[in-house]
Amino acid sequence: MSSVLPGAEVFNTPVYGTVFARRMDALHRLRSGDRLILVPDPPETMLPMVWVHAPGGDVVGHLSPDVSSWLAPWMFAGRCYAAEVAVLRGDDVASWRRLVITAWRVRRPAVKSA
């Protein structure tokens, strides 16, 4: 179970699934502080996950089901979250502990009507 509380404005969380396909190639190009892109599965997906993409769009992995279960619906509803690499460990560390990200809610400025 995740220690991230649903609705957190800022949180750190590990990225899962980094060892599949060619995701390790993208992981090896990352550096601490690099910005990341968070993208939820389509809304009609039974249990949508939130996917983590490197700059340029390569998939790096996904957030845990616990975090995705509240974050994806909020993103569908219009909330925006940004993320960056917080901790990046080597291949000698368990895959689910290699990449930890910091994510935060991005508040959009209010639009004034004319």
Image: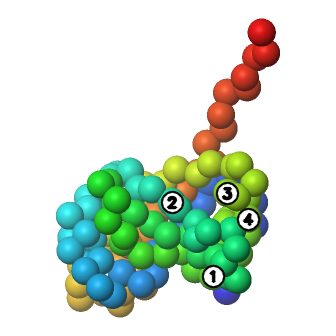
Q: Secondary structure at mark 4?
A: helix
Q: Give the spatial CA distance, label 1 vs label 2.
A: 14 Å
**Residue under circle 1?**
65
Determine whether label 1 and label 4 are within 8 Å by CB.
Answer: no
Q: Label 4: which residue? A: 73
The amino acid pointed to by label 2 is Leu
Q: How many marks?
A: 4
Marks 4/3: CA–CA distance: 5 Å
Looking at the image, which residue is at 69% across and 68% down?
Answer: 43
From the top left corner, tell me how far across and down residue 32 is, in percent: 31, 57
Is 8 on the left-hand or right-hand side of 38?
Answer: right
Q: Earlier in the sequence, mark 1 or mark 2?
A: 2
Residue indicated by mark 2: 38
Residue 101: x percent and y percent?
46, 63
Q: Earlier in the sequence, mark 3 or mark 2?
A: 2
On-image quarter of the C terminus: top right
Task: Say whether residue 88 is left or right of residue 40.
Answer: left
Task: Tell me where residue 6 appears, x and y as whole percent.
Answer: 75, 67
**Residue matched to label 3:** 75
Alpha-carbon span between mark 2 and mark 4: 13 Å
Tell me the distance, in whole angstroms, between the alpha carbons under discs 3 and 2: 9 Å
**Answer yes or no: do the residues labelled 4 and 3 have beta carbons within 8 Å?**
yes
In which quarter of the view is residue 107 placed? top right
Residue type beneath disc 4: Pro
Q: Residue furthest front?
A: 44
In this picture, is 101 found above or below 112? below
Left or right of 52? Residue 111 is right
Q: Is residue 2 shown to the viewer in this render? A: no
